[in-house]
Image (tube, grey):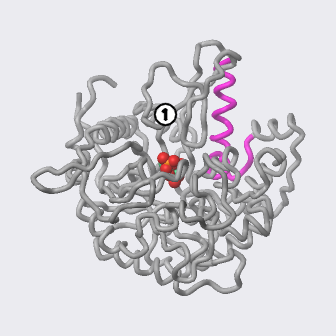
Amino acid sequence: MAPVAFPDGFLWGGATAANQVEGAYDEGGKGLSIQDVMPRGIVGPRSDGPTPDNLKLTAIDFYHRYASDIALLAEMGFTVFRFSIAWSRIFPNGDDEEPNEEGLAFYDAVLDECARHGIEPLVTISHYETPLALAECYDGWASRELIGLYERYVRVLFERYGGRVRYWLTFNEINSILHAPFLSGAIATPADQLSETTLYQAVHHELVASALATRIAHETMPDARVGCMILAVPTYPLTPDPRDVIETMDADHRNLFFGDVHVRGTYPGYMLRHFRDRGIELDITEEDRRILTNTVDFVSFSYYMSVCQSTDPDEKAKVGGNVISGVPNPRLEASEWGWQIDPRGLRYVCNQFWDRWQKPLFVVENGLGAHDELVEVDGVPTVLDRYRIDYLNDHLVQLGEAIADGVEVLGYTAWGCIDLVSASTAQMSKRYGFVYVDRHDDGSGSLERYRKASFDWYAEVIRTNGASLRPTADR
Ligand code: BGP
């Protein structure tokens, strides 16, 4: 097989989110975010306030260690670093009149560190960390008022960081709101009491806010490139039964809809039908429709797994997954957390998105959450994470295949490039990093950092622009 070829200037790096790395939840004038009351992630109950068992309150202490952490990323040769800004550091309650200068100064310092190492920042404006007060006082994105509050927030970010940040993402995994309304949309109403109309109204508010941010970015920062961010879950029919194929199409539409609005600037017919069939009547103003025509420059997405769909009532078993679940694929193996591993799904979804939207793609999350064991090699602590290297190698080979298919891909940021707290389970033990962080599920640990075997492996992939990847036996 021909070696994998990545284009010149392809951006290589990793990704994090503020709530999963920073800690310092009550320092620097930060207000509480929804994550500060989610000690068990999305799988467990919320708490009334910050509780000592919530690992995210300290996380990996990136807030105090960002300089040495970014230096480690630079050592691997990163040319891009995706991180998010904690909204509650900038507007502690979300609806404050004035931003918090100390919060702004923190991200100045992070950006300075990126610049020092020649690393391009890729900034997520909202990554599952809405200020808690917006959930409690407004029911999160169910309220139209959030559009104006988000606008105030992005105007501050663009004005302050516009000269230094070119790539912006409006909402992390925006389609996850359909499955995790509190995590993704800060909607405090319990999911079982939430009507579909309210949920889709919240979706609409986010879509308008995203398009508004895109318009403001284009007006105020001529070089900016704004992307939407979608949780990509390629969906396969479990059998060739045409009913399974249509079921699959319907399930896929629920995700593709978000990209369709971001790229085409209007609601697709299949969603209008969905709304009609279910009696969902949304408040969509003429001004909203005008704002939605401000379409994105690129499409970014996370990719961890694929799922199957079936109409067979006996196929009840659901495979666990990255927020979105489905029927297990009998041809695939799964991670220790039950996420089915499917490198070819990455090639498939790249082609699907490119064929559909003809917009450059950016893979902004991908990786393997696994238990790691710290061992000593020549007296140096490390992790021999061959399993992670294999996972990433096989996915990158398939990304190379997609590029060979003609798909335009701007870059790749491996999720959790430094170990961090898991979003779904709030565990430390679900590790993704090239860098091991000595912290454990019970909160113990020195927070020391150690390079894993995958650290040198990834550095070599970046140095050779992908040429060092091991081709897989078949396509
Ligand atoms: C995505 C989120 C990330 C991240 C990742 C891995 O859904 O955007 O925040 O955490 O999934 O998920 P987890 O941490 O649950 O393993």
Asked where in the image residue 210 lies, by quadrant, the reply is bottom right
| In the image, residue 279 above or below residue 363 | above
Q: Residue at x 79, y 67 (%)?
A: 138
Residue 176 spot, x, y in % from top left: 63, 47
Decide if residue 149 is on the left or right side of residue 216.
right
Q: Residue at x 70, y 51 (%)?
A: 181
Q: Nearer the viewer, residue 153 or 315?
A: 315
Asked where in the image residue 35 lies, by quadrant, the reply is bottom right
Q: Residue at x 68, y 39 (%)?
A: 254
Residue farthest to the left, as pictured: 378
Residue 7 spot, x, y in % from top left: 31, 49
* SS category of the residue bearing label 1: loop
Q: Is residue 56 visible?
A: yes
Q: Nearer the viewer, residue 305 or 356?
A: 305
Q: Is residue 412 visible?
A: no
Ligand 1 closer than 8 Å to the CB at disc 1? no
| 78 is within the stretch colored magenta | no
Q: Which residues are magenta?
A: 243-268
Residue 235 spot, x, y in % from top left: 57, 30
Residue 87 spot, x, y in % from top left: 60, 71
Residue, disc 1: 338
